[in-house]
Image (cartoon, coloured by chain):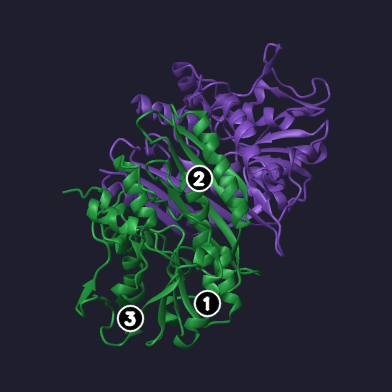
Chain colours: A green, B purple
Amino acid sequence: MDELITLDYGSGGKKTARLIEEYIVPAFENPALRALGDGALLSGAEKLVFSTDSFVVDPIFFPGGDIGRLAVCGTVNDLCMGGGTPKYLSCALILEEGLPLRDLERVLASMRAAADEAGVQIVTGDTKVVERGRGDKIYVNTAGVGFLEHPGLCPDAIRPGDAVLVSGTIGDHGTAIMLARSGMLQSDLCSDCAPLGALCEAMFETGAAIRVLRDPTRGGVATTLCEFVEGRSFGIELQEEALPLRGEVQAACALLGLDPLYCANEGKLLCVVAPEDAERLLAAMRRRPEGKDAVCIGTVTERYPGRLTLQTAPGGSRMLQKLSGAQLPRIC
Amino acid sequence: MDELITLDYGSGGKKTARLIEEYIVPAFENPALRALGDGALLSGAEKLVFSTDSFVVDPIFFPGGDIGRLAVCGTVNDLCMGGGTPKYLSCALILEEGLPLRDLERVLASMRAAADEAGVQIVTGDTKVVERGRGDKIYVNTAGVGFLEHPGLCPDAIRPGDAVLVSGTIGDHGTAIMLARSGMLQSDLCSDCAPLGALCEAMFETGAAIRVLRDPTRGGVATTLCEFVEGRSFGIELQEEALPLRGEVQAACALLGLDPLYCANEGKLLCVVAPEDAERLLAAMRRRPEGKDAVCIGTVTERYPGRLTLQTAPGGSRMLQKLSGAQLPRIC
């Protein structure tokens, strides 16, 4: 029987990983594609980083942002996480027949504002229109080019004993979208959608031995950390009580049956750093508004190689897996 | 009243131009965005070209190609037309729930084959899945990065007396898609979908004074040439009897009520060149399979500044405008 694409394949979890590993990477096989998480390192006289993301978030306007801001921040952040300084973006639009031009204007203005905030220029683009019922208002693709300034960021550089940091509260974007979609808009909860270039710069300026950076978007913190340890000789132990969580997010997750560890973030980063540099790095992060709630949430250990474990407050411990299934379809 | 997006806005003609000029360019305003047609020239230590296109062609498989081949050739050709040598592509997929994985595999294999043919690597990507009825099987975005080798290609470089060349028969892609969509598949007509890098290289090797190159995709030859002359002190006169046209395309256009001058091409280029170099350049083009039907179709003139005119076989003359309305929705 023919296997069909289901929403699970877009969740950012196990099925997405399977799609990429079994179909896409083998089809396009080349070293650059294997080397980096969400971007490619290009060889040439000058080292470039290159990344792309399509955005299909529903609804297109949500508390704390919209699909335009998300599309700029998402690609900018992918380049930053690869050690690059983002410079140029493309913007390709797939518009559904019937979209009000006013909505398009609002999205474009938001992209421009986010690009200015991130210090990048939108330099090329494309526009397609599809019939009503063949799209959903507006889909935005951005690709980005930047210059590689901090080479070597990679999960392979992680060492036992390293500290695992997060730049702020987790699950804000995912829960804000799910709340907006459910029609429960009375909450103060906003997406964290923000460009992270200035925070990264402040982090690199400390000279700390940063092993890897990653923005935990689709699939959330748990899925990203699972990817760090998968097939490697070390594991990561998270401290549940250390996880920074807004009260509103906790309440919304309880209401919607979500786990904040698997909820998307769009303005947060995870960082693995040498233990002796952790405090200094956290201090630098906290001096930036987008890093003010930065905290250490766990450590790298040899105890359970390849595993992500959560030490619960009462002293228990449980294994965390990658997101499986489509907990939050069309979250970005 | 709120103005709504209609299919016309995606036709590649007047409405698309309006959308770009009145909404997109003002929103993102910067010199790179204004400078080039379908790509951006990036400043940096090494000159880079950068381009993007989303592909929403319906059907996704058609005689002579599929959405994957189209997505690679489209972006590769945009970079070539900007004087660049394409090197790296991204691939971002928007999959509709229910797409058979077998179809995805076929599209990915086709992208890989086209990338190999064009000498580029697909180095980064993204995958999203949308619910049934929020997409149409598969939409593909490619962005491309290349190195600028031939700077200065631009309609501003065109001079009165220059020759206007086309690399082969016109309207093949557009009519092949429309025939496939109409269910009339008995025709031998195939899309011309092909990468044009090798042809461009052969053209530059002649040392001919090439003013501008452009691939006449959506909107066809007439719309592209209108863009060359628009607001400038020269016009272009086309000779109707010189237009290279397959018999099948002529028949299909008659049947479907289409004008081949407005039908999309996906493996052809238009070139404006100094008159003294035209014959030499045509000879070089004809030595390549994708340029074997290359021919001079018109001249640049001061007679009707800003206008594109067609000299008909019986000795008449008519003005050609940009495509207006959606003659061929979702052609690429």
Looking at the image, do the residues carrying marks 3 and 2 touch, with CB atoms under 8 Å apart? no
Give the amino acid type for the residue marked by disc 1 in the picture.
Answer: Ala
To which chain does the residue with label 2 belong? A
Residue where numbered disc 2 is placed? A68
CA gap, disc 2 and disc 1: 32 Å
Given residues A121 and A19, the one toward you in this image is A121
CA gap, disc 1 and disc 3: 30 Å
Residue that extends furthest to the left in the rendered view of this protein: A1
Give the quarter of the image for residue B63.
Answer: top left
Looking at the image, do the residues carrying marks 1 and 3 touch, with CB atoms under 8 Å apart? no
Look at discs 2 and 1 and give the one toward the viewer.
1
Dot 3 or dot 2: first in sequence order is 2
Residue B266 in view of the camera: no
Tags 3 and 2 on a common chain:
yes
In the rendering, which numbered label is found on residue A283? 1
Residue A312 image point, x, y percent: 23, 75
Given residues B89 and A90, the one toward you in this image is A90
Residue A64 image point, x, y percent: 46, 48
